[in-house]
Structure formats: structure tokens, C-alpha cells
Image (cartoon, rainbow, N blue to C red):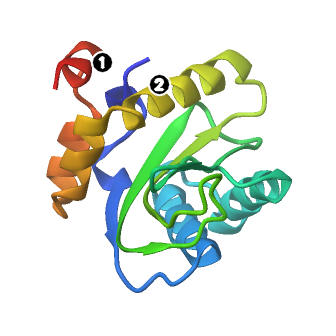
């Protein structure tokens, strides 16, 4: 699965003035709502419910909040580059500045897991993360995120 298939141009945002995890999740849910046509509150509730089970902050300033709910037709991603890192209760206790939200339909077990694996692999690539942190341009962020996997591993 390539991210270009699930991450639209409108789904990449730069956030400033988001002081905490809940506000970031709310902002991402609002963005996802405009893309999917689903209610922002439904999206927020699904992701926040998953977040209550344990933080999706992976470490190294990266978080991948995710959730499943009825009404979606396929896996959808929304990415935020935070101008000011926030506490995300990450495993390494470091603040987060790169957040990729993944949303999936209730029955999308394999697709959801493939998307999670693809995003985690991409965001473990130091050169990709460094490039993401050097720009605040949404179009450039999307270009970095949607390069084919072989290119990002070579970068």
C-alpha cells in the first residue's frame, strides 16, 4: 500500500497553537471530516477511544493515532506537522511534532494493518523524518510522505 492512495493533498496540514494531544486530535478529526464526509465528533471519538487504551506516540517525536468506525469506504490518512511539539505520552516521554492519523472502516483488518505498517516503516526512516521537520509547506510534506517506498529507503 502506498500512502499516495490514502493521503490526499487536503489531508496534510501544519498546526500552530495546538497546546495538547486532544486539540491536535480534534484538528485532525476536523480535517478528516472534510475529506471523508463523516462527522468530526465520530472521528475524534474513534481515535480518542483507541488512544485511551495506550498512547500511539511511538517515540522520536512521532505519533500514529488511529481508529476504526462504520461509514468509511476505505482507509484514510491525515498528517500534521506541529510547529510546536506537544506531550503525547509517548513511550520515550519525548514531545511529538509529526502526527499521522489513520482511519479505517470497521471491517478493514488487513488494509488497516498494512497502512499502519507502511506509515511506521516510513516514519522510522531518519532521512524522511529530518526532511519532514525541515519544511512547513503542506505540498512538500505530502511529496515526502508519498514517495514510493524504495525511494524513501534510499533517501
Q: What is the quadrant of residue 133 in the picture? A: bottom left
Q: Residue at the location (77% across, 41% down)?
A: 70
When the figure is inspected, residue 39 is found, relative to residue 141, above or below; the finding is below
Q: Position of residue 64 (x, y in %)?
A: 56, 47
Q: Position of residue 130 (x, y in %)?
A: 23, 47
Q: Which percent across, then down, holds residue 146?
A: 27, 32
Location of residue 2 (image quadrant): top left
Question: Eyeballing the image, is 114 above or below 59?
Answer: above
> In the rendered structure, are the residues bearing label 2 and label 1 in contact, judged by CB atoms less than 8 Å apart?
yes
Disc on res. 43: none
Which of the numbered marks, if any, corresponds to residue 149? Answer: 1
Q: For residue 75, which quarter of the picture?
A: top right
Residue 17 located left or right of residue 4: right
Q: Residue at x 48, y 43 (%)?
A: 77
In the foreground, 52 or 91? 91
Measured as percent of width and height from the top left, residue 39 is found at 65, 62
At a point 25% along the width and 13% down the height, the residue shown is: 150
**Secondary structure category for the residue under label 1:** helix
Q: Which residue is mark 2?
A: 118
Mark 2 neighbour density, 10 Å: few (under 14) some (14–19) many (20 or more)? some
Whole-Å distance between the Cαs marked 2 and 1? 8 Å
Front position in the image: 34 or 121:
121
Amino acid at each position: 500500500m502506498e500512502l499516495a492512495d490514502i493521503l490526499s493533498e487536503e489531508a496534510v496540514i501544519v498546526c500552530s497553537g495546538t497546546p495538547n494531544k486532544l486539540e491536535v486530535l480534534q484538528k485532525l478529526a476536523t480535517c478528516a471530516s472534510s475529506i471523508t464526509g463523516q462527522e468530526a465528533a465520530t472521528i475524534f471519538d474513534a481515535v480518542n477511544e483507541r488512544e485511551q487504551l495506550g498512547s500511539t506516540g511511538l517515540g522520536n517525536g512521532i505519533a500514529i493515532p488511529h481508529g476504526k468506525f462504520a461509514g468509511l469506504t476505505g482507509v484514510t490518512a491525515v498528517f500534521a506537522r506541529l510547529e510546536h511539539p506537544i506531550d503525547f505520552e509517548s513511550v520515550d516521554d519525548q514531545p511529538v511534532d509529526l502526527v499521522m492519523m489513520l482511519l479505517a472502516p470497521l471491517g478493514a483488518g488487513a488494509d488497516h494493518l498494512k497502512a499502519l505498517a507502511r506509515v511506521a516503516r516510513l516514519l522510522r526512516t531518519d532521512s524522511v523524518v529530518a526532511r519532514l521537520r525541515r519544511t512547513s509547506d503542506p505540498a512538500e510534506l505530502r511529496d515526502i510522505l508519498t514517495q514510493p517506498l524504495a525511494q524513501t529507503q534510499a533517501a
